[in-house]
Each structure stands twice: as structure tokens, then as C-alpha cells.
């Protein structure tokens, strides 16, 4: 195995475990809600998507700390890391009024989108509770960038494992009312997530406060607001957040359109997406590694090293995704049998049957999803964030616009899944062309 591949594995594997823990938590969250009440699982899908739309811009912005720190290290400027991290924290705290307003207006937003009346109060409850953890989620995304940017990714892994375990335990206790606590259902699932978000933030803050880090990274000396550094950070990081928004917004529109078809199609979609997330989210770990390593090598060793790192990351991602593509085709029904456990109602059984066909769509796009994710991360690590935003915005708009324009109406579940598949294929093509063009090789963020 090449040196580039070993380096990617060293940095990416802990991040894959970390991201994999998130996929397990999301999967457990929705599965436990289905066992509690099928309506709650459907509501968690739509509510979770809206929550992500609300928080994704600040999270995407904050998460660029890792790539930027990678470039600072590559440029021989570790003493600026503490000040950069503080700028991301101040930016995170500025989101509080926005998150409060979003929680207050959640129910109205769901009513405006034409969701089934029975789902609206449940969806709103889920989002309102989750918003209490919004700032915590943004802060931990910013602070974790130090550990990814300095390639201490095992720290992220262990913090994620601890918070994920805490989240699942809290889900069991709060959803079903164990240990003498009241049965909270979907509110309990959200409360468990909120506690886990803040737990991660506290863990990272505690680790960063260690005196041994101060002489190199100067956290205490960098506590103030640096307008110039904040402005430069925002220039390269806001496109990353807006990219999340365009993709999340487009996907939410698609989910809401599916929700208008009824509870059963939405449940089936949730089931298929759950298994898609198990495959996709660990790829985020490889993408973070690619972004950080490309940023460091571009300044430290030159573009050829950055290219080798990207190729090694892409090969690892495709190998991982290929296993899942085969699993969806060969063992999809066996996977979905999980949703037949217990005493599912007739709607849930019907949703399982529909979800079996939807996993075929996931198998069609999973390899190209890995391609667009890794190449997009490499471009962002170099600083080509505005192109990544433009590509995401255009493909998202075309996908949703095409879907709405040619929507066949009733029975349109498969149509919307074709829209998702075509969207991902288009993104993979655009990112590949941009990466091969090589313009990113001359870019710098610091």
C-alpha cells in the first residue's frame, strides 16, 4: 500500500468510526421511534430534515476549521490556530437568536409545506426540542476541527463513541419511559440528542484547555475577536455552509413532496434512507481526512502530494461503498426485516415492502455519491469552496425543478427517487471535471 494510502487510512479510519457512530445513533433513533409509534418515525424524518436545514449553514461554516487549520499547519503557522478556533466559536454563538426564532416558528413552517395534519404537531415538537442543542452542535463542529486539522482524529473517535452511546441509552430511557421516568416518545428522542450534542462540546473544550497545547497553538492568547481573520475564514467557509443548505433544502423539498403522498411512502423512504445513512455517513470521515490532508499537502509538499492523497481517499471510499451497493442488492430484504420485528401495524408492513424497491435506487447511486463527496471535500480543502457551492446550487435547483415540473402526481414515489439518483450522478460528474481541471492546485486559504 502506498504512503498516501497509509496516511489517509491513519487519519480517516477514526473519523469513519466517529461518523459511523452518528449513523448508528440516527438509525437507532428512528428504529426505536418506529417501535414506539410509526407516526413518530415519519415525523422524525421530516423534522430532522428541517432541523438540518436550519443548522447546516453554521455547521458547514464551523466545520471548515479543520481544513483551514490543516493549511495553517502546512504553512508553518500553528501559533495562529488558537485565534482561528476562537473566531469560529464567536461565530457559533451568533446563531442563538436565529435558532430561537426557528424553534418558535417550526409548526407554522410545517403547516405551510402541506404536511399531513396528524404529523405537524409531532414534527414541530421534535424540531423545537432539537433546537435547544443547535448551538452546542455548531460549537462542537468548530472545536472538533482542531483535532481533525492537527490529525488527532482518534480523539474525535472516542468522544463520538462516548456521546453516541449516551444518546442511544437516553433514547431507550426517555422514549419508552424506563427507570421510572415518563414516556416521552419523540420528545425523548430529541432530548437525548440535545444532551449528546452538548456533551461532545464540553468534552472538546475540556481537552483543548490542557496546558500542554498552549505554547504551540496559543488558545488563551487568541481569545479575542480578530476581524481580519474572521473575515478571511468566512470568505472560504460560508460557501461550505451554503452548500449544505442548498443540498439540504433540495432534499427537504423532495422529502416534503414524498410526505404529501401519504404516511406510508414517507415511512418507506425513511426506512431506505436509514440504511443509506449507515453507508454514507462513515464516508464523511474519509471526506474530512481528504480535505485536511489536501489542505496541508498543498502548502507543505505541493499539488502532486495533494492529488495522491485525493486518489487514495477516493479508492478507499469506493471500496467501502461497493460493499454496501452489493449488500443492498443481495441482502436488502434481510436488512429491512428489522422493521418487521415486534408488532408493526399494517402501514409499517406496507412501507417495508415499498422500501425494498427503494434500496435498489440507493445501490444505483451509492458509488457516485462517494465520488462527489470525496472530490468535493478535496476541492474545499484546497479553498475552491465557491465552485463547490455553485455546483451544488445549480444541480440542486435543476433536480428539484425537474422533479416538480414533471411530477406525475399520485404514485410518484419512484419518480422522486429517480430525481435523487440523477441529482447525485450530476454532482459526481461536475466534481470530477473540476478536480481534473486542476485550477484548485493554485488556491490558498491562509
Image (cartoon, rainbow, N blue to C red):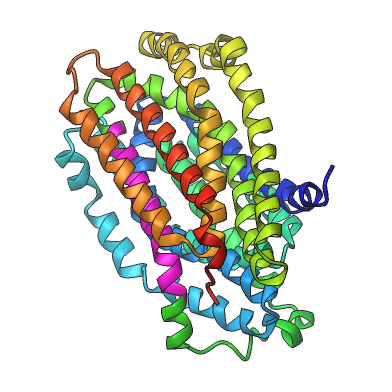
Query: Which residue lies at the image location 63% right of the left edge and 88% below the top edge?
Result: 220
Residue 339 on image: x %, y %:
51, 16
Query: Which residue lies at the image location 72% right of the left edge and 67% below the top edge?
Result: 301
Residue 47 on image: x %, y %:
34, 40
Is 24 situated left or right of 41 in this image?
Answer: right
Residue 269 on image: x %, y %:
39, 23
Is 99 situated left or right of 7 in this image?
Answer: left
Whether residue 117 appears in this view of the structure is no
Where is the C terminus found, in terms of image quarters?
Answer: bottom right
Helix, strand or loop for the magenta stretch, by majority: helix
In the displayed structure, would residue 440 be above or below residue 366? below
User: Would you identify the image quadrant in which residue 150 lies?
Assistant: bottom right
| Of residues 186 and 67, the one drawn nearer to the viewer in this rendering | 67
Is 218 situated left or right of 180 in this image?
Answer: right
User: Would you identify the image quadrant in which residue 252 lies?
Assistant: top left
Where is the N terminus found, in terms of image quarters?
Answer: top right
Is 380 situated left or right of 74 in this image?
Answer: left
| Of residues 206 and 121, the one drawn nearer to the viewer in this rendering | 206
Query: Which residue lies at the image location 26% right of the left edge and 33% below the top edge?
Result: 256
Part of the protein shown in magenta? 233-254
Residue 250 drawn in magenta: yes
Residue 360 drawn in magenta: no
Q: How many marks?
A: 0
Query: Which residue lies at the image location 54% right of the left edge and 15% below the top edge?
Result: 336
Whether residue 347 appears in this view of the structure is yes
In the displayed structure, would residue 217 be above or below residue 98? below
Report the residue that reaches farthest toward the front: 437
| Of residues 360 and 221, the one drawn nearer to the viewer in this rendering | 360
Amino acid at each position: 500500500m502506498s504512503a498516501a494510502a497509509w496516511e489517509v487510512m491513519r487519519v480517516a479510519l477514526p473519523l469513519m468510526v466517529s461518523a459511523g457512530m452518528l449513523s448508528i445513533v440516527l438509525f437507532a433513533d428512528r428504529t426505536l421511534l418506529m417501535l414506539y409509534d410509526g407516526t413518530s418515525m415519519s415525523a422524525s424524518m421530516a423534522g430532522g430534515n428541517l432541523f438540518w436545514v436550519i443548522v447546516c449553514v453554521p455547521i458547514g461554516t464551523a466545520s471548515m476549521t479543520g481544513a483551514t487549520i490543516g493549511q495553517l499547519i502546512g504553512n508553518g503557522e500553528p501559533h495562529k490556530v488558537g485565534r482561528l478556533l476562537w473566531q469560529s466559536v464567536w461565530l457559533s454563538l451568533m446563531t442563538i437568536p436565529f435558532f430561537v426564532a426557528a424553534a418558535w416558528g417550526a409548526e407554522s413552517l410545517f403547516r405551510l409545506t402541506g404536511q399531513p395534519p396528524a404529523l405537524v404537531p409531532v414534527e414541530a415538537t421534535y424540531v423545537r426540542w432539537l433546537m435547544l442543542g443547535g448551538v452546542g452542535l455548531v460549537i462542537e463542529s468548530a472545536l472538533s476541527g482542531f483535532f481533525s486539522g492537527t490529525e488527532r482524529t482518534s480523539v474525535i473517535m472516542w468522544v463520538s463513541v462516548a456521546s453516541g452511546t449516551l444518546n442511544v441509552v437516553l433514547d431507550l430511557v426517555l422514549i419508552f419511559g424506563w427507570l421510572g421516568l415518563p414516556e416521552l416518545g419523540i420528545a425523548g428522542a430529541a432530548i437525548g440528542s440535545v444532551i449528546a450534542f452538548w456533551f461532545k462540546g464540553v468534552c472538546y473544550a475540556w481537552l483543548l484547555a490542557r496546558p500542554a497545547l498552549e505554547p504551540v497553538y496559543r488558545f488563551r492568547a487568541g481569545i479575542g475577536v480578530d476581524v481580519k481573520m474572521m473575515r478571511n475564514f468566512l470568505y472560504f467557509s460560508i460557501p461550505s455552509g451554503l452548500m449544505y443548505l442548498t443540498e439540504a433544502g433540495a432534499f427537504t423539498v423532495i422529502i416534503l413532496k414524498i410526505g404529501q403522498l401519504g404516511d406510508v411512502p414517507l415511512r418507506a423512504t425513511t426506512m431506505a434512507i436509514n440504511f443509506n445513512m449507515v453507508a454514507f455517513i462513515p464516508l464523511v470521515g474519509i471526506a474530512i481526512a481528504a480535505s485536511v490532508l489536501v489542505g496541508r499537502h498543498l502548502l507543505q509538499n505541493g499539488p502532486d502530494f495533494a492529488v495522491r492523497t485525493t486518489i487514495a481517499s477516493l479508492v478507499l471510499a469506493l471500496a467501502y461503498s461497493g460493499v454496501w451497493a452489493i449488500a443492498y442488492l443481495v441482502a436488502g430484504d434481510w436488512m429491512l426485516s428489522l422493521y418487521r420485528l415486534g408488532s408493526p401495524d399494517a402501514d409499517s408492513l406496507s412501507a417495508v415492502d415499498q422500501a425494498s424497491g427503494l434500496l435498489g435506487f440507493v445501490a444505483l447511486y451509492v458509488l457516485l455519491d462517494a465520488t462527489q463527496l470525496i472530490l468535493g471535500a478535496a476541492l474545499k480543502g484546497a479553498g475552491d469552496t465557491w465552485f463547490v457551492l455553485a455546483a451544488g446550487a445549480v444541480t440542486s435547483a435543476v433536480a428539484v425543478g425537474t422533479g416538480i415540473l414533471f411530477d406525475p402526481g399520485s404514485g410518484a414515489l419512484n419518480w422522486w427517487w429517480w430525481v435523487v439518483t440523477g441529482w447525485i450522478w450530476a454532482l459526481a460528474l461536475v466534481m470530477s471535471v473540476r478536480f481534473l481541471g486542476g485550477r484548485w492546485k493554485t488556491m490558498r486559504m491562509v
